[in-house]
Amino acid sequence: MKLIVNGQSHEVAAATLAALLVELDFRGSWLATALNGDVVQAKERDRCWLTEGDRIEILSPMKGG
């Protein structure tokens, strides 16, 4: 399925947000995620189903300013 992740198009097999993070090799409990503009808490990612054309933002904290 085709998704927009952090502004870039990706063709993925993942069906849930949790599976997408694994497929795209995002690791760590400190990640913040949003699906179509709505924040998705870490505990909800395995129940957050994806559909064609969804927009996902994956953010991680950065050191410095």
Image (cartoon, helix red, strand yellow):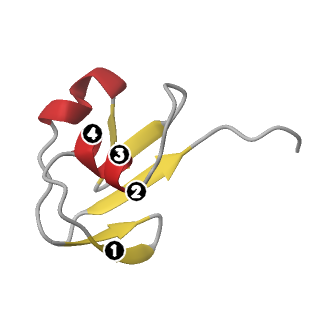
Residue beneath disc 2: 24
* In this rendering, position of residue 20 left or right of residue 32: left
> Which residue type does callout 4 highlight?
Ala
Of helix, strand and loop, which one carries label 1? strand
> Which residue type does callout 3 highlight?
Val
The N terminus appears in which quarter of the rendering?
bottom left
Q: Are marks 3 and 1 in contact (CB under 8 Å)?
A: no
Residue beneath disc 3: 22
Disc 4 to disc 1, C-alpha distance: 16 Å
> Which residue type does callout 2 highlight?
Leu
Work out whether residue 45 or residue 28 is closer to the camera in this orientation and state it.
Answer: 28
Comparing labels 2 and 1, the label whose residue is closer to the camera: 2
Disc 3 to disc 1, C-alpha distance: 14 Å
Q: Quadrant of residue 5?
A: bottom left
Residue beneath disc 4: 18
Of helix, strand and loop, which one carries label 2? loop
> Which residue type does callout 1 highlight?
His
Q: Are marks 3 and 4 in contact (CB under 8 Å)?
A: yes
Q: Are marks 2 and 1 in contact (CB under 8 Å)?
A: yes
Q: Are marks 2 and 4 in contact (CB under 8 Å)?
A: no
Q: Which mark is residue 10?
A: 1
**Looking at the image, is 59 positioned above or below residue 10?**
above
